[in-house]
Every structure is written in structure tokens, then in C-alpha cells.
């Protein structure tokens, strides 16, 4: 479904990503891990369209989306959850979702001045859809709270909900589990799995929490210094000597 | 375009003199912008008040012209400290409030000048009479003196920034606020310093300009616009950029009216800047 | 219906009625002119606020006013269009230029955008000042005719060569414009603008074409700036583009002050700010050169002490009231 071909991304003189090939199949949960600075978020940024690659292609459902700006990728069905809690600060939880619905609802210019019955109806339908998604992520109680008033874990869930509002086929999750308690982590992992099982949503997950990634992902790719050093099933990756070396090396540097 | 070489020499010297005056404005704007992140739209009025102080001291009170300029510098530097502390520090960190504060200040200062000195134009005594012979053409001495002053001041500022403890602290603060804080540099002190130096420079610029051109309560607005053009051209936050940009603009402002027409002269720099902001937003020497 | 739902529309209707009666109540040409100019300014400041809704500070609004003003005047005088057609066309010209410039301009942030727009307006002004062929150059355009008289069956003919009558055109155009802006601000369009303002990266990733929405916002705001300019041209009857004119930097500064003093948080802010400051300015006029000083001091006072502007006052009072209540009764009163 998603293919990254021969991706290079340079910032000035620094090669953040080199010669990366990725292949993500429909319906799988694909993990992207690696020590700090390996370029994982950069890859996600390229797939999402925040960065343009220096070289290489990104192909989604057979279409070359390499040069598409982020909003066009969203139209094609790619949704993104950012690393930090990026939310619409002045909106409530429900309103945050309604922004997400923008993509799938068509609103005409005349609605600015006059809303006919159909428009009112559509808004009602949207509000119901929003509540559905909120129930899924467990935020239905907080629907009218200001998004910024939520605790961190709930905000994370809201970020996911907003992404879901665009009815995506591919989810890009940038460290969805950061700062979460064990309970919240398990819930999030269940949700990602449920999205795959119930709605067929493919996910690419960048994470630091190795244990979670091993438990959650169908396949994993490991990056180090911008290059892919390993790709495969979780148990293969975990035993790969290069991977261990990369992480140990990183630990030694940190010490 | 077929003008004798003498005219070109005069035009270039004029351009350089003008350029150095612009540099004095632009440096001040850059100091305040890089130290406090504030666009000080009233800086043109500081320039203007500096000139009027010299007028009052030298013409009304009969003080020696250069002494008046020195006093004007000191007065405006002190004024700058007060402005920083009471007007601008409270609104630091936001985008619109400092702009509105500086707009209010513009109105107040312009008004004050009109109240005290009237709306009609005046002039400061010329810095020198007569002219030198340079490359076969007569170059007015006062332009040379203005250039000399400006360069001298610039060298002093440069030495201050490079050699003195406070100057180096200012540079460090401008480049990286957090690490400067960690090193124990007091940001308020830096802002104070930046503001007072900026105002002193503007005061000198105004005094020199008042001697070459005319004084009026509204004389501060065109230099401010030029100052904005320069800091964009040279790069916001770059002192080298402000200097080079100022000189380039001064030359353009002097050469283009002669080579083309005054119309082109007023439009060209603006269009250049608009293009630069879009193509290379960091300007010639800026870093962002 | 609770109290608030009755008070607000009633007071608006009352104000509108008073505004329509103004030419009957006010005899002085001078004060009528001030009121007319105030209406034009209200439109300008309100449209400036629209741009601010996307966190962009446009210091170049007068540039688009200039396009509208000269555009209307030239279309009427040189091309022979009737006033209404010229007005709309000039507004469209203004928004067209805004669209073209907006595409590159809106990509840059805060300070850069402010400086860019300031310099752009100055460029337009310089062009108008020097282009003798088109705009009359330094002399400007003179003798701009008033709109042609309108004949209403049964009411007779109304001619617009007096300010008392022309005021009605200004009032109607401004009221219509303000209601359009108001509806826009409470529409799904503005919902997206607010989303873009809060987090434009997130807006992008949920499929909002941020650049497009910003351009639309800018173009609409500049359309109304152009309309205001057109109204101004036929109000003033002559146009000039020198530095101290209506199209210079000083007007921009005043417009910003009106916006901030009024308060940018609510739709009524610019209206209140403009009216209050213009009338303060008028009452300070006998003080001569002190007048700008008073406005300037007021602006600084508001920015430093009253960040929400005048319309922020009710909220400030509420907070103060609640604080006092807590202190005196020791109870958290809910107001």
C-alpha cells in the first residue's frame, strides 16, 4: 500500500536518511524503530509531506505522492499523529474532531449565509460521527471540554481521534506512546490493533518503547544513522546482532 | 545617463554619506530586534528628537555643535533606557503589542516635537562649509564629516561588541538567549544596553541628517522605512547586514534618481526588498 | 429567550436606527463628515481584524485602500462606469492583487509579513505618486464626481452631492459589508481559519489547504479595504498619494491603534475602537498639536494595562468582581 523507494533526505550537509526502501502492506501495523537521531521522524515527515525528499519516491496505493503537500495526502487517505500533542487549542474536544471532518464533508459557500435543512442535517450527522469516534478512543465524557485542559494521555487519544476523523486508510503515528502510563499504553495499543482489525486501517508506528513495538507490530524496520539496518518480523529483529549493536552503541554514547 | 564624471563622484559621495546615516538607523533597529525581538517603529522619532535636541542646544542655547551632539546622544541613550524599562519590556515576547506601543510612542514624540518646535521645517547649522576636491569634482565637506562621524561611531560599536565584556555578552545574548541565560548574563541588562546604544546611534544619525537635510517633526518616518528595507536586505539580526545593506541602499537612493528618475528611486528599493523577502528571507547575511 | 438574547439585537437595531437618523439630527457638515469617515474607518479596521484572525498583521491595508480608491475614481472618470459598478470592480481589483501577492506573502510569518505588507503599501503609494499618466502623479486626482442621483418612484430623486446624502450610501455599503464579514466569522469558513490559526500543521494534515484558506481570507479582507477606498474617493472628491495622505504610513498606524484599543477578540471591537478614538480625536482637536499625543498615550495605556482593549473591559470587570466576591465572602461566587 505504501512504498518508499530509495529515499534520501539531506539537511544542508547532513544526510538524515539514506537509500531507504520501505514496503508497507495494507492492513498491517508496521513499526519503525532505531536509536535517537536515526531519522525515524524524518522518514515520517517525508511520508506525510512535511518534508520533500532530496531523492527518492513515496508511492501510496500505486500513486506517486512524492511531491504532494500534506493536505493532498490527507485527501488520499493518509492521516498523521504528531510527536507532540498538536491540537486546536481554542476548540473543545468535539470541535477538534469536527475540523477533521472537513475533508469528508462538502460544504458549499452559500452555507456561510444560509443553512438549509440538508446542511443542518449534515451537521447533525457529523456530530454523531464525532461522538462515535470519541467513544472509540474513550473521550465521550470530555466532548465539550477544551482540548488543552485534558491530561496528557487523553490529549494523545484526542490526537488519534482527530486523525481518525479524516477516515484514513493509512495512519502515521509518531511516538504515540510517549509519556503514557502502562495502562494508557495498553489502551492505545489495543486501539491501534482494533483499527486494523475492525476498519482495516494500516499503521506506521515510530516508537521508542521497544517492548510495545514488539508486541504491537506485524513487521518492523530498524534505522540507524538514517539507514535501514534490518527489516522483518519482531522476533527476527530482536535477535539481529546489528540491531543490538546499534542500540547498545547508542547506550554507550549516552553514558 | 551621459553625465560628466564629476557628477558621478558627487552622487557616489552623497550616496555614501546617506548610506552611513541609514546604517546608524538600521543598526539600532537591528540591536533592538535581535535583543528583544521587537520591531521598534518609533525609532525614526528617536532619530528626529535627537536632531531637535541638537537644534535646541546649539541654535537656541548657543552650545558648541559637537558638544550638543554628544549631549543629545547621552540624553537619548538615557531616554532609551527608560523606554526599554517602562514601555517595551512589559510587552516583550508578543508580536502586536510592541508594535502598537511603538506606534503610540511615534505619535507622542512627533506631537511633542510639533508642540515645542512647530510644524515648519528648520535646519541645523552645516557641519562645515565649502568642499574638498576629490577626483576632480567638488565634494561638500559636510558630507565627508558625516561619513567620518558615522564610520567612527561604527568602529566604536564594533570594538565594543568584540572587545568589551558587555559587548560580547550582547552578541552572545542575541545569538542564543537560553545559553546566555545559563551563563549568567542578565537579559534585562542586555536589553537596556541594546536600547540605549540604539537610541544613541539614532540621535547621532538624526543630528547629522539635520545638518545635511532639514528638520521637521515628520523627518523620522522615511528613515524608518529605509531602516526596515535595510534590515530585510541585510538580514534581520545581522549587524554586518545592516551596515552593508545601509550602504547599498544609500548608494541606490543617490544613484538611481540621477541615473533613472526619482520615481524609480522610490519604487526600486521597495520592490527589491519584497523580492528578497520572498526568495531569500534571511537577507544577505542573516541566519534563520 | 434570556435577557442577553434580547438586549443584543435590540441595541444593534437601535444603533442602526440612530445611524440612519443621523443626517436629520446632525446639521453640521463637519460632524457629518466625521461620522461618514468613521463609518469608512470602521470597515477598514474590521477587515484588518479579519486578517488578524489568522494571526497575520497586515501593515499594508492602506495599499489596498489605495487600489480601491484610485480604481473607483478612474473607472468612473476615465471609463465612465456608474458608481456602483466601479465600486465593486475596484473591490475586486483589490482582492485580485491580494490573491496574487498573498500566495507568496502568506507563507512568511509574523514580523516578516508585517514588514512586507508595510513596504508593499509604500510601493503602491509611490507608484501612485509618480505615475502622472494614470493617477495624476503628485497632483493626484481632482474633482471626483459624486454618484449619480437615484430616482425612487414615489420618493423622488436623491442626489448625492452633499455629505448628508452621500452618507447614506456609505452607511448602507458599510452595514452590508459588516454583515458579510460577521456571517463569515460565524461560518464553517471561519472555523477552518481558527483551526489554521491554532495549529496550521495539524490543519494541513487533516486535509485543509492552508495556503488557499489564508489567501481567501486575505483576498476578502482586501476586497473590503478596496470598497472602503472607493467610498473614500467619492467622499473626499480628490485623491493624492503623498506621504502624509490617507494612503501613507500614518494611516496604517492609526488603523492599528483603533483595532487594538477597541479590542480584537470580538467583532464589535474595531467598531468601538474606531468610534471612540475618532471622537476622542475630535474632542482633542482644539488642543492642536497635542492631539496625536493623546491618542498615542491612550494606545500605550490600553496595550499595557488593558490588553483586551475596550471590549475586554466587561470580562476584566467580571474577573475583578469575582475576586472581590471571593475576598469578602470567602465563597466562590458564580456570576
Image (cartoon, rainbow, N blue to C red):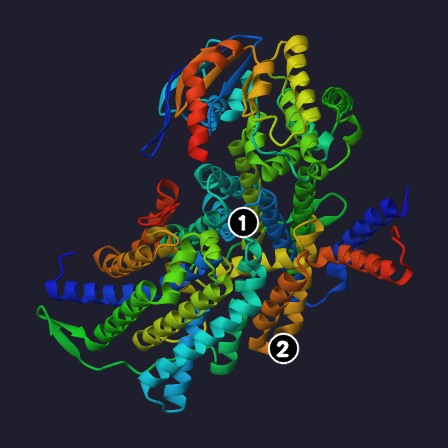
Q: Are marks 1 and 2 on the same chain?
A: yes
**Relative to A186, is C192 above or below?**
below
Tag of residue C57: 1
Instruction: State the image quarter where residue C165 is shown.
Output: bottom right
Q: Residue at x 46, y 9 (%)?
A: A62
**Relative to C185, is A68 above or below?**
above
Return the chain for callout 2: C
Q: Is residue B90 left or right of residue A3?
A: right
Q: Residue at x 46, y 18 (%)?
A: A222
Q: Is residue C160 visible?
A: no
Q: Say which quadrant the C terminus of chain B sits in.
A: top left
The residue closer to the viewer here, A7 or C206, is A7
Q: What is the CA distance from the residue labelled 1 to the residue labelled 2?
A: 33 Å
Q: Is residue C25 left or right of residue C103?
A: right
Tag of residue C286: 2
Q: Residue at x 41, y 76 (%)?
A: B50
Q: Helix, strand or loop at disc 1?
A: loop
Q: Residues within 10 Å of mark 2 (few under 14, many from 20)?
A: few
The residue closer to the viewer here, A108 or B171, is B171
**Relative to A121, is C146 above or below?**
below
Q: Helix, strand or loop at disc 2?
A: helix
Q: Is residue C118 left or right of residue C328?
A: left
Return the chain for callout 1: C
Amino acid at each position: 500500500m505504501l512504498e518508499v523507494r530509495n529515499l534520501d533526505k539531506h539537511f544542508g550537509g547532513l544526510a538524515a536518511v539514506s537509500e531507504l526502501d520501505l514496503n508497507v502492506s495494507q492492513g498491517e501495523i508496521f513499526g519503525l524503530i532505531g536509536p535517537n537521531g536515526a531519522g525515524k521522524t524524518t522518514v515520517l515527515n517525508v511520508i506525510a509531506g512535511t518534508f520533500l525528499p532530496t531523492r527518492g519516491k513515496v508511492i501510496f496505493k500505486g500513486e506517486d505522492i512524492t511531491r504532494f503537500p500534506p493536505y493532498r495526502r490527507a485527501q488520499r487517505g493518509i492521516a498523521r499523529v504528531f510527536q507532540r500533542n498538536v491540537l486546536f487549542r481554542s476548540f473543545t474536544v468535539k470541535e477538534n474532531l469536527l475540523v477533521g471532518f472537513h475533508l469528508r464533508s462538502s460544504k458549499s459557500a452559500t452555507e456561510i449565509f444560509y443553512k438549509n435543512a440538508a446542511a443542518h442535517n449534515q451537521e447533525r450527522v457529523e456530530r454523531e460521527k464525532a461522538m462515535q469516534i470519541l467513544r472509540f478512543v474513550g473521550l465521550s465524557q470530555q466532548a465539550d471540554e477544551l482540548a488543552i485542559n485534558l491530561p496528557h494521555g487523553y490529549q494523545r487519544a484526542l490526537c488519534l481521534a482527530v486523525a481518525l476523523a479524516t477516515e484514513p486508510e493509512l495512519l502515521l503515528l509518531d511516538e504515540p506512546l510517549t509519556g503514557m502510563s502502562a495502562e494508557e499504553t495498553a489502551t492505545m495499543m489495543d486501539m491501534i490493533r482494533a483499527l486494523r482489525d475492525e476498519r482495516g486501517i494500516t499503521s506506521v508506528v515510530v516508537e521508542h518503547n521497544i517492548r510495545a513495538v514488539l508486541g504491537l507490530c506485524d513487521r518492523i524496520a530498524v534505522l540507524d544513522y538514517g539507514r535501514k539496518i534490518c527489516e522483518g518480523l519482531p522476533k527476527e529483529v530482536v535477535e539481529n546482532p546489528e540491531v543490538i549493536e546499534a542500540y547498545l552503541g547508542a547506550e554507550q554514547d549516552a553514558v | 545617463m551621459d553625465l560628466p564624471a564629476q557628477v558621478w563622484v558627487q552622487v557616489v559621495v552623497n550616496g555614501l554619506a546617506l548610506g552611513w546615516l541609514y546604517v546608524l538607523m538600521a543598526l539600532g533597529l537591528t540591536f533592538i530586534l535581535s535583543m528583544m525581538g521587537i520591531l521598534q517603529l518609533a525609532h525614526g522619532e528617536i532619530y528626529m528628537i535627537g536632531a531637535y535636541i541638537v537644534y535646541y542646544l546649539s541654535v537656541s542655547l548657543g552650545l558648541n555643535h559637537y558638544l550638543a551632539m554628544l549631549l543629545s546622544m547621552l540624553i537619548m541613550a538615557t531616554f532609551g533606557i527608560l523606554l526599554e524599562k517602562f514601555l517595551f519590556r512589559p510587552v516583550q515576547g508578543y508580536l502586536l503589542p510592541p508594535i502598537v506601543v511603538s506606534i503610540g510612542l511615534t505619535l507622542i514624540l512627533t506631537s511633542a516635537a510639533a508642540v515645542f518646535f512647530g510644524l515648519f521645517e528648520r535646519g541645523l547649522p552645516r557641519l562645515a562649509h565649502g568642499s574638498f576636491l576629490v577626483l576632480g569634482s567638488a565634494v561638500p565637506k559636510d558630507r565627508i564629516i558625516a561619513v567620518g562621524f558615522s564610520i567612527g561611531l561604527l568602529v566604536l560599536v564594533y570594538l565594543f561588541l568584540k572587545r568589551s565584556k558587555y559587548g560580547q555578552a550582547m552578541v552572545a545574548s542575541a545569538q542564543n538567549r537560553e545559553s546566555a541565560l545559563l551563563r549568567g548574563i542578565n537579559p534585562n541588562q542586555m536589553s537596556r544596553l541594546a536600547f540605549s546604544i540604539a537610541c544613541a546611534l539614532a540621535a547621532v544619525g538624526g543630528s547629522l541628517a539635520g545638518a545635511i537635510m532639514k528638520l521637521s517633526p515628520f523627518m523620522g518616518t522615511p528613515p524608518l522605512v529605509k531602516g526596515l528595507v535595510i534590515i530585510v536586505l541585510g538580514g534581520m539580526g545581522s549587524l554586518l547586514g545592516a551596515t552593508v545593506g545601509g550602504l547599498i541602499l544609500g548608494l541606490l537612493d543617490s544613484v538611481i534618481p540621477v541615473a533613472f528618475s526619482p520615481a524609480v528611486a522610490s519604487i526600486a528599493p521597495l520592490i527589491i526588498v519584497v523580492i528578497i523577502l520572498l526568495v531569500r528571507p534571511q537577507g544577505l547575511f542573516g541566519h534563520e | 429567550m434570556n435577557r442577553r438574547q434580547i438586549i443584543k439585537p435590540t441595541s444593534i437595531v437601535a444603533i442602526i436606527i440612530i445611524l440612519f437618523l443621523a443626517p436629520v439630527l446632525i446639521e453640521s457638515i463637519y460632524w457629518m463628515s466625521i461620522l461618514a469617515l468613521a463609518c469608512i474607518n470602521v470597515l477598514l479596521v474590521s477587515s484588518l481584524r479579519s486578517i488578524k484572525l489568522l494571526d497575520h498583521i497586515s501593515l499594508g491595508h492602506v495599499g489596498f485602500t489605495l487600489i480601491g480608491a484610485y480604481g473607483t475614481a478612474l473607472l468612473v472618470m476615465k471609463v465612465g462606469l456608474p458608481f456602483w459598478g466601479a465600486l465593486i470592480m475596484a473591490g475586486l481589483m483589490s482582492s485580485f492583487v491580494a490573491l496574487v501577492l498573498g500566495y507568496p506573502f502568506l507563507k512568511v510569518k509574523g514580523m516578516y509579513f508585517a514588514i512586507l505588507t508595510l513596504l508593499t503599501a509604500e510601493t503602491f503609494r509611490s507608484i501612485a505618486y509618480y505615475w502622472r499618466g494614470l493617477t495624476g502623479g503628485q497632483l493626484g486626482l481632482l474633482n471626483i464626481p459624486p454618484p449619480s442621483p437615484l430616482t425612487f418612484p414615489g420618493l423622488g430623486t436623491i442626489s448625492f452631492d452633499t455629505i448628508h446624502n452621500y452618507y447614506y450610501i456609505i452607511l448602507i455599503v458599510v452595514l452590508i459589508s459588516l454583515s458579510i464579514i460577521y456571517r463569515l466569522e460565524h461560518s464553517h469558513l471561519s472555523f477552518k481559519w481558527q483551526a489554521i490559526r491554532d495549529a496550521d500543521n495539524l490543519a494541513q494534515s487533516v486535509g485543509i489547504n492552508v495556503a488557499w484558506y489564508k489567501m481567501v481570507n486575505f483576498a476578502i479582507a482586501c476586497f473590503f479595504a478596496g470598497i472602503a477606498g472607493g467610498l473614500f474617493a467619492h467622499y473626499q472628491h480628490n485623491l493624492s498619494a503623498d506621504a502624509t495622505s490617507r494612503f501613507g504610513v500614518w494611516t496604517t498606524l492609526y488603523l492599528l491603534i483603533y483595532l487594538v484599543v477597541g479590542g480584537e477578540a470580538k467583532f464589535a471591537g474595531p467598531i468601538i475602537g474606531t468610534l471612540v478614538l475618532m471622537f476622542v480625536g475630535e474632542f482633542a482637536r482644539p488642543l492642536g498639536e497635542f492631539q496625536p499625543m493623546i491618542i498615542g498615550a491612550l494606545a500605550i495605556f490600553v496595550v499595557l494595562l488593558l490588553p483586551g482593549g475596550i471590549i475586554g473591559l466587561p470580562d476584566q470587570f467580571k474577573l475583578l468582581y469575582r475576586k472581590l466576591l471571593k475576598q469578602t465572602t470567602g465563597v466562590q461566587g458564580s456570576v
